[in-house]
Image (cartoon, coloured by chain):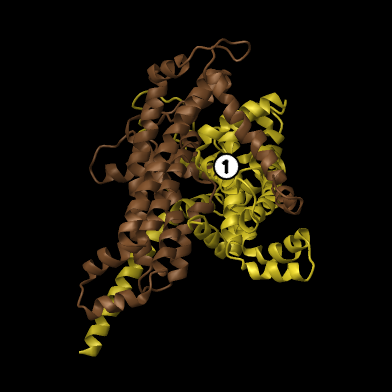
């Protein structure tokens, strides 16, 4: 028990803990109950039935698969592109601050504000097709075929590269200049300097960026929903679309089961990434 | 020799800068298009883009209209008629705009207060289960919307708040992200300040109000901007919690425009991003610092 003298932390924490418990922790744990019964009111225990049914549900699997493949493609792309951009912006260039600003701007622009533009660009009669057909290729029905996946990736990258770029730039600027000077004296080439100094010192930041990018990639529902509504093309039907349908049909059992499957998945992923980081961190002594 | 090397260096710098400028213009293109098109007449917008389907409009198969929509950056005649419609004639837009404000503002203010208090306890005070509790906060922070909306939904239903703005505002205020970010910031405030205030006889609340808060101004500004960005942009929560379309924020309204309203929508989109852009112009450095803080490990 805390001594009377130590009661102040409780007072400072109280509002946050009360709110956190009410809206996150208690219903989260309580939600476990719903995932193990057959009806939210007076239901009886059915074990893992809800989970098994969910994992057999083709719509859930489709949504899960789409979300997973989107994340698997867009997150590495995001990291590569934002790292490349940060490396270029970290060099000696004109109007460095102005350029950096330009790449951060999409981050603050509401998704809904540019939806019109994406629709005009990627419609079957849109401007991209205008360009494609004037070059002599046949136009593509972007939003009504599997190309929709590509559109969503482009729109996601447009908005999210800035965030990672800022993080990479900050860690690039934290690498002591002397390391490069010593390497110069040793006669190391620029590729060796890049792999042996830059990449090594970016690794800790990269792990965090990786995890945050995965979590942010789940927000791509916003773009998909605003561009193509509640029932988009099959390949961009995301987990959030599925969850929204469960919300509107008040299906607590499926909702909570789906939430727990995702939560366990994310938790494992974060655990794996941070353990990997610890291992690599101890070998480079950083 | 020296001048030649300098020449190559200068050349490289120029090529790199030009390349990045071109990239920047491509990145900024959607904004440019939205803003310039908001000054076109409805007729010009219709002429340019009527062949493009609006959302939820199911076109026939292979519905190529025989004509492509070519983006137009410069209005043939500048008009502010769309703004007149949006701001004065059509009340729908203004209602939705204020809906967005009424949702975002309490979340920002509430989260700043709750998070800075909790962060002070987490960063500067010792108590049992501190690290375990903070770990729970981090785990919840890392969960995607699809997961946290479910507990929110269960509790909102139990409290009878469904359809009420509080169903979005309350979970927003207690979002753990603010606690995480402010803790990151307060870790860097030297303990010596607190110790010397204690010697002078100040109690914890005095220390918090007259030392911690003033020294955390940058962190608070950064948090305010990040929370503003996220909530001005909200889509998921209103779809789940607000059945009444009249209560929806601007983000969802803008995606449900009809044919023939596209011109108005450009003006509405421009006004919608304006507060964000102004905050950004004023507080870019705070935003950058906020992002950097979120990437630091504590």
- Residue at the image position 22 percent from the left and 86 percent from the top: B4
Q: Is residue B182 above or below residue B45?
A: below
Q: Nearer the viewer, residue B171 or B63?
A: B171
Relative placement, left or right, of B283 versus A286 is right
Relative vertical location of residue A54 with respect to residue A222 in this rendering, above or below = above
Along the line of sight, the residue nearer the viewer: B87 or B153: B153
Quarter containing the C terminus of chain A: bottom left
Residue at image location 66% in from the left, 50% down from the top: B118
Quadrant location, the N terminus of chain A? top right
Residue wearing tag 1: B265
**Residue depicted at x 37% and y 50%:** A78
What is the secondary structure assignment of the residue under circle 1? helix
Q: Chain of mark 1?
A: B
* Residue A140, percent from left and from top: 30, 35
Q: How many marks?
A: 1
Q: Is residue A171 left or right of residue B4?
A: right
Locate residue A240, reporting x and y percent: 49, 30
Q: Alpha-carbon neighbours of circle 1 within 10 Å: few (<14), some, or many (≥20)? A: many
Q: Position of residue B98 (x, y in %)?
A: 70, 43
Q: Is residue B270 visible?
A: no
The reply to whether residue A24 is in sight is: yes
Task: Choose top left, top right, bottom left or bottom right for residue A103.
Answer: bottom left
Tell me, by letter, which chain the rendering colours yellow: B
Q: What residue lies at 56% left-to-right and 34% top-to-bottom?
A: B148
Residue placed most toward the observer, A217 or B175: B175
**Residue B90 location (% of width, % of height):** 69, 39
Chain A, hue in figure: brown
């Amino acid at each position: 028990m805390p001594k009377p003298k130590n009661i102040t932390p409780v007072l400072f924490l109280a509002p946050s803990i009360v709110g956190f418990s009410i809206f996150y922790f208690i219903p989260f744990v309580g939600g476990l109950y719903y995932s193990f019964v057959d009806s939210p009111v007076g239901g009886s225990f059915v074990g893992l039935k809800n989970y098994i049914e969910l994992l057999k549900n083709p719509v859930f699997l489709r949504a899960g698969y789409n979300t997973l493949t989107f994340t698997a493609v867009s997150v590495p792309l995001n990291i590569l592109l934002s790292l490349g951009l940060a490396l270029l912006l970290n060099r000696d260039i004109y109007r460095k601050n102005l350029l950096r600003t330009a790449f951060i701007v999409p981050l603050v622009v509401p998704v809904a504000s540019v939806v019109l533009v994406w629709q005009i660009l990627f419609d079957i009669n849109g401007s991209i097709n205008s360009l494609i057909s004037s070059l002599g290729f046949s136009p593509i029905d972007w939003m009504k075929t599997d190309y929709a996946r590509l559109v969503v990736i482009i729109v996601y990258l447009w908005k999210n590269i800035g965030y990672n770029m800022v993080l990479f730039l900050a860690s690039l600027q934290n690498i002591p200049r002397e390391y490069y000077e010593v390497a110069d004296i040793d006669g190391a080439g620029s590729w060796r300097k890049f792999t042996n100094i830059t990449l090594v010192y970016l690794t800790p930041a990269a792990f965090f960026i990786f995890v945050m990018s995965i979590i942010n990639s789940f927000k791509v529902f916003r773009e998909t929903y605003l561009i193509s509504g509640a029932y988009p093309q099959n390949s961009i039907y995301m987990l959030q679309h599925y969850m929204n349908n469960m919300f509107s049909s008040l299906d607590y059992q499926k909702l909570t089961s789906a939430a727990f499957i995702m939560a366990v998945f994310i938790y494992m992923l974060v655990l794996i990434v941070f353990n990997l980081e610890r291992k690599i961190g101890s070998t480079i002594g950083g | 020799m020296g001048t030649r090397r300098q020449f190559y260096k200068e050349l490289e710098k120029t090529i790199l800068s030009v390349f990045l400028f071109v990239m920047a213009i491509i990145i900024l293109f959607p904004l440019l298009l939205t803003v310039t098109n908001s000054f076109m007449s409805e007729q010009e917008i219709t002429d340019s883009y009527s062949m493009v389907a609006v959302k939820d409009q199911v076109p026939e198969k292979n519905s190529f209209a025989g004509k492509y929509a070519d983006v137009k950056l410069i209005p043939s005649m500048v008009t502010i008629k769309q703004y007149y419609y949006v701001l004065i004639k059509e009340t729908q837009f203004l209602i939705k705009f204020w809906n967005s404000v009424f949702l975002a503002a309490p979340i920002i203010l509430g989260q700043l207060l709750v998070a800075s208090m909790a962060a002070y306890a987490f960063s500067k005070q010792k108590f049992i289960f501190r690290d375990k509790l903070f770990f729970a906060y981090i785990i919840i922070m890392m969960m995607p919307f699809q997961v946290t909306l479910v507990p929110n939904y269960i509790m909102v239903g139990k409290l009878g708040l469904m359809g009420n703005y509080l169903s979005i505002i309350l979970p927003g205020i207690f979002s753990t992200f603010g606690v995480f970010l402010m803790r990151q910031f307060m870790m860097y405030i030297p303990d010596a300040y607190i110790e010397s205030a204690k010697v002078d006889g100040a109690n914890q609340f005095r220390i918090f109000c007259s030392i911690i808060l003033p020294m955390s101004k940058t962190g608070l500004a950064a948090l305010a901007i990040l929370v503003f960005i996220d909530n001005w942009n909200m889509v998921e929560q209103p779809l789940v919690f607000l059945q009444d379309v009249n209560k929806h924020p601007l983000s969802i309204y803008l995606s449900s425009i009809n044919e023939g309203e596209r011109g108005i929508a450009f003006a509405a989109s421009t006004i919608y991003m304006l507060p964000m852009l102004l905050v950004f112009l004023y507080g870019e450095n705070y935003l950058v610092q906020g992002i950097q803080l979120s990437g630091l490990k504590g």
